[in-house]
Image (cartoon, rainbow, N blue to C red):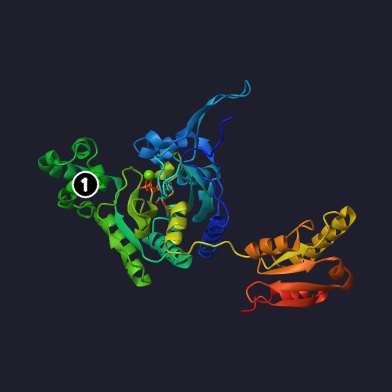
């Protein structure tokens, strides 16, 4: 029989690495809670049309990366339906906002999510087919202040705080404004004009983009094209007064809060409902996949999927890339040792005695665990040497429980870091074990 393996682009996360994942998630929840965000959990699959409209048919995600299938009807009353594993979570959050009429509260909805996303990409380091995103969205009616540049600045300041608290040093915030859809249409024409004389010197992709979608030229990664792209007009010069003022206000608030940023004139999003602020946090430790997170404003998204006017701003961070970055910064987790290993000492040949000592060991382990200690439990059939060897790999101390200890209520405890062996009365055992290991 062929052995079955995890599907290409998916992985098992094992301890001790999962401890790092848990720490990242706990830190994110704690920070989001301080900024008054609440958790939202949307389904892992949705109607395909949601992503076609909410992410955009033109994007790489929708045009080539989605896991889509035709879901069979199970009854006469059902219709077959095209479903898709979510490639991102913003569309689901906005769908939920519309479906539950959250705009009618008149308040800003501030929600965060943590969960798996699916994209059929070419797997490589930092790029998987199932990966996890941690994201947050601020959405609401304009009367709730959802369009205010203060929302943008607050989200960015929150991200700076989160990355700092996670211990991710050396991040860079790149920021730009893509203006309104009218601004962008204007800029597209400016670019088209500017590209006419120079496009023939560029890569074939850019030659095509220069005609079909000039904005995408800014995404080109071909080294020879870079100096040419640097000479192109900048989108900031095509912004109207309102967009310029909005962007200036975002930057002023970031300056006041002391959040450092770099202007990146090439950071654009190609979709009509992405508006104004766009940003990315990058980290050098990631190599080619250097983007930790991306986000921006999407004032037209709700309307694009049939909802009311509900401007918003949000971001999605790649949790897999946070883990890689922390590991590169040597903040990965080593397997922590438990407080103690309880080693029942039995006689493998005497079944009744073995049963009794194992049962007594479980009772002792229960006592200690209920006192808040982390305990690994051995087995009475182990020889003493094997118990010691096993314990020394996973625990800070070993507690020996043989017939004598059971009768006397005095246990033998050995501390592996100091090598000292002590006798401890059972009533004092939990207190003894909770003290830091002697040096
Ligand atoms: P990239 O340029 O790396 O493809 P993207 O523009 O597709 O990123 P977004 O859709 O903005 O990324 O997603 C936000 C974040 O999610 C990214 O910055 C990245 O950290 C993470 N991410 C995206 N795709 C993957 C993937 N296939 N595997 C792991 N993380 C991913
Ligand atoms: Mg991508």
Horizontal arrangement in the rendering, residue 122 relative to residue 221 (left or right)? right
Quadrant for the C terminus in the image: bottom right
Determine whether 244 is above or below 304 in the image. below
Residue ID for mark 1: 187
Q: Position of residue 309 (x, y in %)?
A: 42, 46
Determine the image quadrant of residue 60. top left
Determine whether 130 is above or below 113 in the image. above
Q: Residue at x 54, y 46 (%)?
A: 12
Q: How many marks?
A: 1
- Kindly tell me whether residue 368 is visible in this rendering: yes
Q: Position of residue 104 (x, y in %)?
A: 53, 49
Task: Tell which residue pokes out farthest to the bottom in this image.
Answer: 439
Task: Tell which residue pokes out farthest to the top in this image.
Answer: 76
Tell me if the residue at label 1 has its CB under 8 Å from ligand 1.
no
Q: Position of residue 291 (x, y in %)?
A: 37, 53
- Kindly tell me whether residue 371 is visible in this rendering: no
Horizontal arrangement in the rendering, residue 310 relative to residue 365 (left or right)? left
Pick the front one: 337 or 53:
337
Horizontal arrangement in the rendering, residue 271 relative to residue 387 (left or right)? left
Q: Residue at x 68, y 68 (%)?
A: 339
Q: Residues within 10 Å of mark 1 (few under 14, many from 20)?
A: many
Per the image, label 1 sits on a secondary structure element best described as helix
Pick the front one: 438 or 208:
438
Quadrant for the N terminus in the image: top right
Q: Position of residue 300 (x, y in %)?
A: 38, 45
């Amino acid at each position: 029989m062929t052995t079955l393996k995890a599907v290409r682009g998916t992985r098992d996360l094992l301890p001790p690495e999962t401890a790092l994942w848990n720490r990242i998630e706990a830190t994110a929840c704690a920070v989001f809670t301080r900024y008054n965000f609440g958790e939202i959990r949307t389904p892992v699959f949705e109607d395909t049309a949601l992503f076609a409209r909410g992410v955009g048919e033109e994007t790489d995600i929708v045009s080539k990366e989605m896991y889509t299938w035709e879901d069979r009807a199970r009854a006469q009353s059902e219709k077959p339906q095209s479903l898709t594993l979510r490639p991102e979570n913003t569309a689901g959050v906005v769908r939920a906002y519309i479906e539950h009429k959250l705009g009618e509260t008149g308040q800003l909805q501030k929600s965060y999510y943590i969960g798996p996303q699916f994209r059929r990409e070419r797997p490589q380091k930092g790029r998987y087919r199932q990966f996890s995103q941690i994201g947050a969205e601020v959405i609401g009616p304009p009367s709730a202040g959802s369009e205010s540049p203060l929302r943008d600045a607050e989200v960015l300041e929150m991200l700076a705080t989160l990355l700092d608290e996670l211990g991710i040093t050396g991040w860079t915030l790149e920021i730009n404004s893509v203006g309104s859809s009218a601004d962008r249409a204007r800029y597209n024409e400016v670019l088209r004009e500017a590209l006419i004389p120079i496009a023939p010197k560029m890569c074939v992709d850019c030659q095509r983009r220069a005609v079909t979608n000039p904005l995408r030229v800014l995404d080109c990664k071909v080294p020879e094209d870079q100096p040419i792209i640097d000479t192109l007009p900048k989108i900031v010069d095509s912004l109207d007064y309102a967009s310029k003022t909005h962007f200036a206000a975002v930057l002023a608030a970031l300056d006041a809060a002391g959040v450092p940023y770099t202007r990146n004139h090439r950071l654009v999003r190609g979709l009509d409902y992405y508006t104004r602020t766009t940003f990315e946090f990058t980290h050098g430790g990631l190599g080619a996949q250097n983007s930790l997170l991306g986000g921006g404003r999407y004032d037209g998204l709700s309307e694009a999927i049939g909802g009311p006017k509900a401007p918003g701003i949000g971001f999605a961070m790649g949790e897999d890339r946070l883990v890689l970055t922390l590991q590169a910064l040597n903040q990965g987790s080593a397997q922590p040792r438990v407080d103690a290993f309880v080693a029942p000492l039995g006689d493998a040949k005497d079944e009744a005695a073995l049963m009794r000592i194992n049962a007594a060991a479980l009772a002792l382990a229960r006592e200690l665990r209920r006192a808040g200690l982390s305990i690994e439990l051995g087995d009475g059939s182990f020889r003493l040497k094997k118990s010691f060897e096993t314990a020394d790999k996973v625990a800070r101390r070993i507690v020996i429980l043989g017939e004598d200890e059971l009768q006397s209520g005095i246990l033998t405890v050995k501390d592996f870091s100091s090598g000292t062996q002590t006798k401890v009365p059972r009533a004092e055992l939990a207190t003894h074990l909770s003290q830091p290991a002697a040096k």
